[in-house]
Image: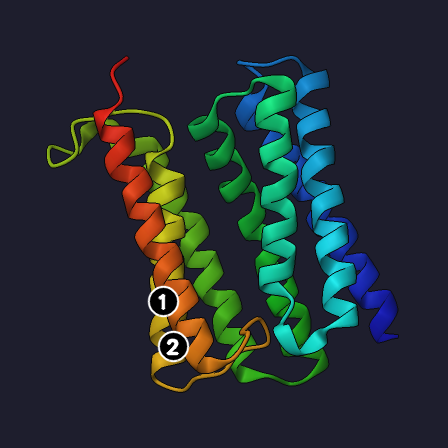
Amino acid sequence: MMAIASILINFVGSLTFLFIFWKRLREDYSSEIVFKTAFNILVGILVGSLIFLKFSQIGFFWPVLVGALVGLGLSFFRFRVRFYETFEAFIIASFPWIGLTFLLDSITHSSLTSFFAFIAVLIFVFAAYYLDTHYKDFSWYKSGKIGFAGIVTLGIFFIVRSTLAIFGIHMISFVGLKIEAVVSGAAAFLCFILLLNLARIKE
């Protein structure tokens, strides 16, 4: 029963990912390029999932994320898609899938922590939407460029993960509390480096 629920959740999550990813990029690229890019990401996610199944002690999040980023990176070279707008589409399209994964775990394992994580991901979804519709109005960030909403949301996401690990709150997606605190903290730092670079890019 649990396996069926997992397959269903991942099916719905992947369809949701594909729709949001396509919707955000459809005006800039052909549907063929968008879906080929998405296919590369999904293949990377599949490879990451297989690695997780073989080495489950490392947690599902990082193998899946690295696999997805490798697939995305290949698309930058193969299809010449622009980095920031495609990366942002990937981030925003991924959050609903992540939320569904936490929701499934909260139900199947009666995990209150996973349920709170699901609620947190919903908040990130709404935060990304708000930032995406208002980023040009922020007086403290003059860039006004696509990519801001996704990278800020992802940076805060990693800060929250690192903070939870520091305070000893474990989650199914953690690789280990001490390592998670460092790796998520480094990922958050990288996100804000990308944000600074975005602000410096000239149109």
> Where is residue 18 drawn, in percent x and y?
68, 36
Question: Which residue is found at the position 64% from the left and 60% from the top?
Answer: 63
Q: CA distance from mark 1 to mark 2?
A: 6 Å
Looking at the image, residue 187 sits to the left or right of residue 173; the answer is: left
Image mark for residue 160: 1
Question: Eyeballing the image, is 161 above or below 165?
Answer: above
- How many numbered marks does the figure carry? 2
Mark 2 Cα shell of 10 Å, populated few (<14), some (14-19), many (≥20):
some
Amino acid under label 2? Leu
Is residue 199 shown left or right of residue 44? Answer: left
Depth check, front residue: 17 or 51: 51
Please name the residue shown 83% across and 60% down the image.
Answer: 7
- In the rendered image, residue 128, in percent from the top left (x then y), is placed at 39, 44
Residue 155, given in percent of the width and then of the height, sits at 35, 52
- In this rendered view, identify the residue nearer to me: 154 or 185: 185
Quarter of the image where the C terminus is located: top left
Q: Which residue is mark 2?
A: 164
Query: Residue, x 74% and y 34% (percent of image)?
Result: 39
85 on left or right of 49: left
Closer-to-camera residue (166/182): 182
Q: Is residue 202 left or right of residue 15?
A: left
Secondary element at tag 1? helix
